Amino acid sequence: MRKLTHAEISEKRVPTEHIATVSRLPLIVLVDNIRSLYNVGSIFRTSDGVMIEKLILTGFTSHPPRKEIEKTALGSTKSVPWEYAKHPVEAIEVLKEHGYKICCLELTDKSIPHYNITKAHFPMCLVIGNEITGVSKDVIELCDSGIEIPMFGTKQSLNVAVAYGIAVFELAKIWRNN
């Protein structure tokens, strides 16, 4: 076994000039009041890794162009479609009108494990929330379901960008392989 070179890895990736024609995961991710610009950048980079449909940055979530976002996004702000909406509730209402199922990545009394999602949950809008307070109450009230990542240690949560990475790659696997 040997580590692949950058050139070998690049051969397997979508060229930038073809990014608009790539088949995307039917998943829109709504970012609800994320305060860390580095988390926002990581969310962009992970979103590129699974080719989500779009990111919607809401509330006080910062958006490009910002050097702190670019530091962790590594250019993915150009490959991931995104928009800013001040009010997450309004954005969710529009998505519901277009047939998206709204799922929050949050611990609720009705959350299901992230690996129990099915293709029937798509097209989906996955809502991820603030590092301290999570997804806001008014947004949770609009959600069709909740997704959780089971925790087995003493901590009850993960960093939002880490949790998003776990969840979105599982969602991509479910959509693309089952």
Image (spheres, rainbow, N blue to C red):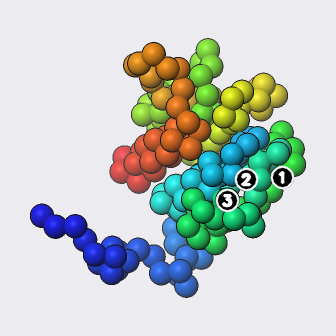
Q: Residues within 10 Å of mark 2 (few under 14, many from 20)?
A: many
The residue at the point 71 percent across, 42 percent down is 34
Label located before the other in sequence (3 or 1): 3
Location of mark 1 (residue): 85
User: What is the secondary structure assignment of the residue under circle 2?
Assistant: strand
Disc with the residue nearer the chain's start (3 vs 2): 2
Which residue is under mark 2? 56
- Kindly identify which residue carries mark 3: 68
The vertical placement of 10 against 29, above or below, is below
Secondary element under disc 3, as helix, strand or loop, is helix
Q: Are marks 1 and 2 in contact (CB under 8 Å)?
A: yes
Q: In the picture provided, is 125 more to the left or to the right than 166?
A: right
Query: Picture coordinates of residue 42 (x, y %)?
Result: 57, 53
Q: Amino acid at mark 3?
A: Glu
Q: Amino acid at mark 2?
A: Ile
- Residue 80 spot, x, y in % from top left: 62, 65
How many marks on residues? 3
Hey, which quadrant is residue 76 in on the image? Answer: bottom right
Task: Say which residue appears at 59% left-offset and 38% top-offset.
Answer: 160
Structural distance between the alpha carbons of marks 3 and 2: 18 Å
Q: CA distance from mark 1 to mark 2?
A: 7 Å
Question: Closest to the observer: 155 or 23?
Answer: 155
Q: Is residue 102 visible?
A: no
* Residue 69 against residue 36 in the figure, above or below: below
Within 10 Å of disc 1 (Cα), the crowding (few <14, some 14-19, many 20+) is: some
> At x 44% / y 31%, what residue is drawn?
116
